[in-house]
């Protein structure tokens, strides 16, 4: 008898048989209905492996949607805010999609395999929305998430691991390029993409072949200090890279109980992803109106004095007027800076001085408050040359 939904356990990814034995701390988190490793044993060790060696992350719980048919390109261009006509086959693009009010539902990546075939990858589930937006288009939309596994290989020595597998053609891949290989008699796509802001690749292949690829990558990477990482270490790397995350740095419009909690691409600092010249897209009228009147707030990067991470801190102008809040924060071991991602109200999002954060520090269960000056900083906080060097630098 099938278990009722409230008693059903979390789903296991195709790589669970490999990740579970390595998760010695037994620390897991939920991702899209799947059990995903939070920390294998030590977050700090995993973080430093991202920045100094090579790492593997099980990306399989990510949602993957195949979009195909004569109107595929027209449909995708209507769905997202950026123009995809210039996205040639063999390339990947970052994109966001909005509701009719111009508020972001989610962000993700778009893979173009051919003139009439795309794959949209996202953190959350969007099949119903994608189908609603497809009315009137000759297009087929299919959720292929369970059929396709994904492994993220990241770090300065990641190309060494790719080379050890004999995949030397990846040498010519530029950021957001992809190529195709045969693996164990089936197709495998490798894209030069990732969520760490570092050199890295992502492998996409049939779920039943994922364990074999994981084993081959672990074996090939032994000489390069390879180790698996969980979501906590990945989160530290993505903050340094200046990437934002739904449900952390902004509330997706589909999850917000109050319409005012949604955020537009302009408020998220993603103006460059909005192309009004391409024709109609979902949310276009609302975004045109917002562009004319000006945004109400903006996501920014912050440099904060001291070394105490300003997690969930409130931000003040002149120590007294609350003007924003921190959504992600960390002391960056690589940048040697106290950094944060925050939302600031207008016009304080352009202030060059006079901003303060209110930090609460837990000292053995004794809470102390500290007011620290901060300033708006450019993102990414960390952008090494190896991130974009082609061919990859030798580490």
Image (cartoon, rainbow, N blue to C red):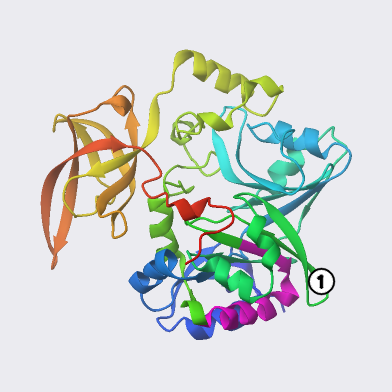
Report the residue that reaches farthest toward the top.
292
Q: Is residue 3 above or below residue 378?
A: below
Left or right position of 307 against 281? left
Where does the magenta region start and end?
202-222
**Label 1: few (<14), some or many (≥20) within 10 Å?**
few
Is residue 63 found inside the magenta-colored segment of the image? no
Question: x, y (%) of residue 156?
Answer: 47, 64
Question: x, y (%) of residue 75?
Answer: 77, 35
Question: x, y (%) of residue 342?
Answer: 34, 40
Is residue 211 found inside the magenta-colored segment of the image? yes
Element under label 1? strand
Residue at image position (71%, 39%) is 87
Question: x, y (%) of residue 383?
Answer: 42, 49
- The answer to whether residue 11 is visible is no
- The answer to whether residue 225 is visible is yes
The residue tagged 1 is 186
For this rendering, which residue is in front, 158 or 228? 158
Magenta segment, prevailing SS (helix, strand or loop)? helix
Left or right position of 165 against 156? right
Residue at image position (18%, 48%) is 359
Residue at image position (70%, 35%) is 79
């Amino acid at each position: 008898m099938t278990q009722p939904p409230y008693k059903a356990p979390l789903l296991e990814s195709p790589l669970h048989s490999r990740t579970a034995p390595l998760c010695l701390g037994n620390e897991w988190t939920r991702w899209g209905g799947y059990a995903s490793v939070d920390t294998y044993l030590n977050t700090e060790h995993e973080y430093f492996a991202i920045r100094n060696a090579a790492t593997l992350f099980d990306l399989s719980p990510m949602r993957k949607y195949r979009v195909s048919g004569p109107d595929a390109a027209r449909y995708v261009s209507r769905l997202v805010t950026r123009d995809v006509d210039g996205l040639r086959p063999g390339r990947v693009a970052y994109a966001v999609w909005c509701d009719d009010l111009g508020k972001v539902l989610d962000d993700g990546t778009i893979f173009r395999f051919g003139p009439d075939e795309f794959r949209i990858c996202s953190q959350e589930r969007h099949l119903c929305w994608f189908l609603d937006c497809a009315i009137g288009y000759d297009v087929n939309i299919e959720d292929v998430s369970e059929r396709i596994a994904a492994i993220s290989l990241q770090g300065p020595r990641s190309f060494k691991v790719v080379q050890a597998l004999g995949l030397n053609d990846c040498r010519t891949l530029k950021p957001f390029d992809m190529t195709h290989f045969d693996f164990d008699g089936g197709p495998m796509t490798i894209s030069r993409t990732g969520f760490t802001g570092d050199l890295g690749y992502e492998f996409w292949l049939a779920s039943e072949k994922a364990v074999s690829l994981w084993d081959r990558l672990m074996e090939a990477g032994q000489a390069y200090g390879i180790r698996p990482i969980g979501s906590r270490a990945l989160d530290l790397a993505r903050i340094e890279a200046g990437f934002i995350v739904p449900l952390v740095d902004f509330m997706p419009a589909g999850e917000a109980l109050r319409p005012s909690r949604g955020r537009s691409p302009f408020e998220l600092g993603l103006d460059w992803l909005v192309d009004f010249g391409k024709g109609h897209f979902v949310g276009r009228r609302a975004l045109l109106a917002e562009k004319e009147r000006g945004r109400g707030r903006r996501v920014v990067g912050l440099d904060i004095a001291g070394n105490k991470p300003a997690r969930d801190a409130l931000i003040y102008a002149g120590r007294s007027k609350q003007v924003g809040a921190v959504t992600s924060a960390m002391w960056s071991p690589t940048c040697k800076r106290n950094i944060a991602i925050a939302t600031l109200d207008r016009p304080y999002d352009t202030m060059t001085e006079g901003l303060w954060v209110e930090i609460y520090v837990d000292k053995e269960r004794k809470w102390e408050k500290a007011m620290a000056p901060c300033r708006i900083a450019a993102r990414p906080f960390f952008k090494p040359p190896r991130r974009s060097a082609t061919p990859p630098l030798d580490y």
